[in-house]
């Protein structure tokens, strides 16, 4: 029997989400129906609602791709999870496992990717349908409100550090102190790195210190490149998270030490202009890291279970708070990630 429940439908660009009764189908072969317990409110969703991102192929849709919940029912052929299991579901609703990218361990680039909240209904709802293969179990000691972070806000910086090859003793600069930045600081500290955080607001930089940054730089008061050079001689790895200002990506290039790696994680519009000779002679690396794989999600859950990362979150009770959470995010009022707790 299909179940009925509330869902926040995205019907029109620029309009608030509309809470309506939705019928959630029974899970088919290999699928599971999840009762949502907590869902992260992501900037990507805000950009989609505000029309800065292209509209989802499925309209109207239900956004929300940072989901933690309880397995409500399972379809045929599902063996490794059962009703009542605590699981997370990410943006990777389904990856094919057989394309060029999947078989090389880069499922985030899957040619047949089905995206949660864009191609199928996502988690701003009481229930969400999922592929059992793409659900990952939550360790018992991780609370509901922390679990969604593993599906994006920890996994994204975790993968950034992984592809940069960050190791103990490296100087890691976290450029941008939003939800991902606070987690990035903690992941880098868990690897034994020296961490410098850069931001523009004093209270967010104070929080960055609280979660473990060794040094903080307010880029409205001092030149971040000169300060990084003065403090460390240059960064081994820079996680560049700034979503709006492409100039900061060029600045980050100059703040690297020889052989250092700039990882692009935020994607502001515009072009970077870099000096080829310095780039070559100093062997600097400029790389992009898109999202994460299921491996990064399970490692993020492990860091949560070990208490090595405590996500910075603001909780909202109930699905009907979704528009309030989105508004607060839009106005930059939230510290860390807004989490809707059902
Ligand atoms: Zn997200
Ligand atoms: Zn694939």
Image: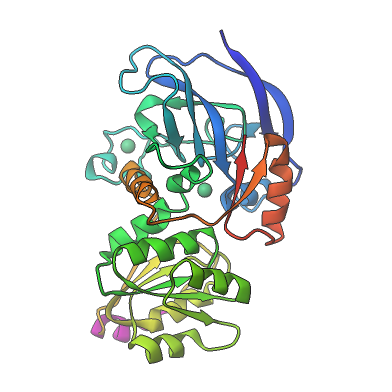
Question: Secondary structure of the magenta portion, mostly?
Answer: helix
Identity of the residue drawn at 59% across and 76% down: 200
Q: Which residues are magenta?
A: 274-281
**Whole-percent x, y for residue 115 in the image:** 48, 37
Screen quadrant of the N terminus: top right
Q: Quadrant of residue 165?
A: bottom left
Screen quadrant of the C terminus: top right
Q: Is residue 159 left or right of residue 221?
A: left
Q: Relative to 52, is 107 above or below?
A: above
Q: Is residue 221 left or right of residue 260?
A: right
Q: Quadrant of residue 261?
A: bottom left
| Residue 20 magenta | no
**Whole-percent x, y for residue 194 in the image:** 34, 75
Out of 121 and 206, give the one closest to the viewer: 206
Out of 147 and 328, give the one closest to the viewer: 147
**Whole-percent x, y for residue 63 in the image:** 60, 38
Out of 71 and 132, give the one closest to the viewer: 71
Identity of the residue drawn at 55% across and 82% down: 219
Q: Quadrant of residue 96?
A: top left
Q: As drawn, which residue projects farthest toward the front?
A: 141
Identity of the residue drawn at 32% across and 48% down: 299
Q: As drawn, which residue projects farthest toward the top?
A: 1
**Whole-percent x, y for residue 292 in the image:** 37, 49
């Amino acid at each position: 029997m299909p179940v009925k429940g509330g869902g926040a439908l995205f019907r029109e660009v620029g309009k608030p989400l509309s809470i309506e009764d939705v019928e959630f189908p029974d899970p088919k072969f290999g699928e599971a129906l999840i009762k949502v317990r907590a869902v992260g409110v992501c900037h990507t969703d805000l950009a989609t609602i505000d029309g800065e991102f292209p509209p989802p192929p499925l309209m109207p849709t239900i956004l929300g791709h940072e989901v933690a919940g309880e397995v409500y029912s399972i379809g045929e052929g599902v063996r490794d999870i059962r009703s009542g299991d605590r699981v997370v579901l990410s943006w990777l609703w389904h990856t094919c496992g057989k394309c060029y990218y999947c078989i090389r361990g880069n499922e985030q680039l899957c040619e047949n990717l089905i995206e949660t909240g864009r191609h199928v209904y996502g988690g701003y709802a009481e229930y969400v349908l999922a592929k059992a293969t793409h659900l990952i179990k939550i360790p018992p000691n991780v609370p509901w409100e922390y679990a969604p972070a593993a599906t994006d806000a920890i996994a994204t910086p975790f993968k950034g550090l992984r592809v940069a090859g960050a190791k103990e003793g490296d100087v890691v600069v976290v450029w941008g102190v939003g939800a991902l930045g606070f987690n990035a600081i903690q992941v880098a500290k868990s690897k034994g790195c020296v961490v410098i955080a850069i931001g523009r607001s004093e209270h967010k930089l104070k929080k960055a210190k609280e979660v473990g940054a060794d040094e903080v730089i307010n880029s409205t008061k001092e030149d971040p490149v000169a300060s990084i050079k003065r403090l460390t001689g240059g960064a081994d790895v820079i996680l560049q998270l700034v979503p709006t200002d492409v100039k900061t990506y060029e600045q980050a290039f100059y703040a690297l030490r020889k052989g250092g790696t700039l990882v692009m994680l935020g994607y502001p519009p515009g072009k970077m202009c870099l000096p080829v000779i310095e780039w070559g002679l100093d062997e600097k690396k400029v790389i992009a890291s898109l999202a994460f794989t299921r491996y990064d999600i399970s490692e993020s859950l492990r860091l949560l279970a070990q208490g090595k990362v405590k996500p910075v979150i603001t909780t909202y009770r109930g699905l009907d708070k979704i528009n309030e959470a989105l508004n607060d995010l839009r106005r930059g009022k939230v510290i860390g990630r807004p989490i809707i707790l059902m």
